[in-house]
Image: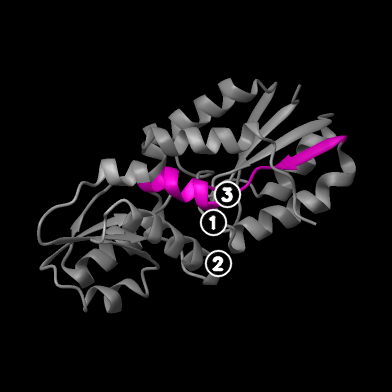
Amino acid sequence: MVDALVIAGCLSGEEGDAGVAALVRELTEAIGADVVVRARTGGRPAGRPLSEVLGDLRHGGARRVLVATTHVARGRLQHEAEAAVRAAAPGFDELRLAPPLLANGEDCAVVAAALDEALPARPGCAVALAGHRGPECEAALARLERALLARGRADVLADSPERLPTRLATRPEREVLLAPFLMSLGHHARHDVLGELAQRLSAQTWPHSLVELPAVRALVVAHVCKLGTVPN
């Protein structure tokens, strides 16, 4: 039995988002913890940081805690979560961290299938999925792009906002559909992707988040139920 479930990542400060609410509800039902709280890892100062939340749970008597990450890949923010969990672990009987969304090739295949259904191909239109920058996140996006290509979606590019304009400039399609490859429609998605990048690309937008897709939520729940461990 888990005493507490911590949902950590970019969703910590988002309120009024139906997809986020659905994920919190589904995780809560799946884990059955006595306490469910959200925590922040990186990003804007919205919500309480993971280290602080874990400290409060320890002082409150929680002994078995599971941390669910809502990060897309094992990049900087996932590393920060791992460090916070490692630092706090001596104060608990059990403290475990689930892996990010795209933890392996099977995960990429699941997410590719969900995106293939949500964003059907259109003649003369390239689909651009804009995720986080950084070598590890960009590598995960490249794996996702290959998984989409394996499904026959040669029209889809998955990359960081900084790299997408150059790649799209060499494409034959006349139109671009820009979608944030992010778990929630927070500040970064709305301003940097759907705002600034969309204007730069003269792109149509898909104003939705990954967490709105049921298959993505199910994958996050599956990761948590498998009790992902903290890397050494």
- Give the amino acid type for the residue marked by disc 1 in the picture: Ala
Question: Circle 1 — which element?
Answer: loop
Q: Position of residue 200 (x, y in %)?
A: 22, 72
Q: Is residue 118 visible?
A: yes
Can you identify the residue that label 1 sits on? Answer: 73
From the image, tell me which residue sits under label 2.
Answer: 136
Q: Earlier in the sequence, mark 1 or mark 3?
A: 1
29 or 154: nearer the viewer: 154
Q: If the image is split into quadrants, where does the C terminus sit?
A: bottom right
For image coordinates 59% across by 23% down, the residue present is 30
Q: Position of residue 90 (x, y in %)?
A: 89, 45
Amino acid type assigned to the residue bearing label 2 in the image: Glu
Percent from the top left, x then y, of residue 75? 58, 62
Which residue does the numbered mark 3 point to in the structure image?
Answer: 100
Mark 1 burial class by Cα count in 10 Å: few <14, some 14-19, many 20+: many
| Residue under the image location 41 percent in, 35 percent down | 215
| Left or right: 113 as drawn, with respect to 99 | left
Badge 3 local density, few (<14 within 10 Å), some, or many (20+)? many
Mark 2: give few (<14), some (14-19) or many (20+) Cα within 10 Å.
some
Q: The residue tagged with tag 3: helix, strand or loop? A: loop
Between marks 1 and 3, how big is the CA–CA gap? 5 Å
Q: Nearer the viewer, residue 85 or 188?
A: 85
Q: Residue at x 86, y 38 (%)?
A: 92
Q: Which residues are magenta?
A: 93-112
**Is residue 209 among the parts visible in the rendering?**
no
Look at the image and tell me in which quarter the N terminus lies: top right
Quadrant of residue 59 within the rendered picture: top right
Contact between marks 1 and 3 (CB within 8 A): the answer is yes
Q: Is residue 133 left or right of residue 231?
A: left
Looking at the picture, how far across and down is residue 161, in whole percent?
Answer: 36, 69
